[in-house]
Image (tube, rainbow, N blue to C red):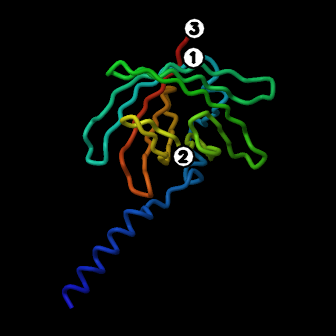
Amino acid sequence: MFRALRRFAVIFATLSIVTGCTTMSPQDFASTTPALSLEEYFVGKTKAYGLFHDRFGTLQRRFTVDITGTLNNEGALVLDERFSYADGETQQRVWTIRKADDGLYEGRADDVVGTARGELAGAVLRWTYDLDLPISGRTWQVAFDDWMILMDDGILMNKATVSKWGLKIGEVTLVFRQVKE
């Protein structure tokens, strides 16, 4: 009997980890202010400061991102992101983000697998996508679940859960600020 109960507890715990426990939706924040507009916030220059913590909470990487945002001829937001890591590594990602007919956002970048999806409500954006991430000479396909929240002073905060096969491998924390030219 004890063995069966222990087995059930292990299975339940594993399923809870794999499926996640969050029921939070961007619509829960529809009335929050200031309202976030991706096009208004990111057109121009933006600077971000970031940390990556592994699943145990250990700081693994520090980095900054210089972002230049423009609107192309089709009205899509183009974000040119230049990453500089504390260990000297650099990386570039160029996003093309479009507002879909249903009010949601869709985004593409060279290392994004398929299409990123975004749901915006009030001060909050939830942005989900799969990314080909180079790690130790190999490429891992990982899932990102980003939650961005615009604060009163124009600071945009982002917390992203990074997972593989449904298991959390780490978290990215970013703080964005617009750069006045």
Toward the top, the furthest residue is 181
Which mark is first along the chain, 1 or 2?
1
Secondary structure under badge 2? strand
**Residue 57 in which image quadrant:** top left
Q: Which residue is mark 3?
A: 181
Q: Seen in the image, is 87 located left or right of residue 40?
A: left
Image x and y of residue 124, in percent: 55, 42
- Residue 120 in view (yes/no): no
Q: Which mark is residue 45?
A: 1
Residue, x 55% and y 21% (percent of image)?
67
Toward the front, the furthest residue is 137
Q: Report the Cα–Cα distance between label 1 and label 3.
A: 8 Å
Residue type indicated by callout 2: Asp
Check contact, mark 2 vs mark 1: CB within 8 A.
no
- Seen in the picture, residue 120 relative to 9 is either above or below; the reply is above
Residue, x 59% and y 44% (percent of image)?
113
Image x and y of residue 122, in percent: 60, 43
Q: Report the Cα–Cα distance between label 3 and label 2.
A: 33 Å
- Residue 13 in view (yes/no): yes
Observer-side mark, 3 or 2, equals 2
Residue type indicated by callout 3: Glu
Badge 1: residue crowd in 10 Å (few <14, some 14–19, many ≥20): some
Secondary structure under badge 3? loop
Closer to us: 73 or 23: 73
Q: Seen in the image, is 176 located left or right of residue 54?
A: right
Closer to us: 171 or 157: 171
Secondary structure under badge 1? strand
Quarter the N terminus occupies:
bottom left
- Seen in the picture, residue 91 relative to 51 is either above or below; the reply is above
Check contact, mark 1 vs mark 3: CB within 8 A.
yes
Residue, x 29% and y 34% (percent of image)?
60
Q: Which residue is mark 2?
A: 130
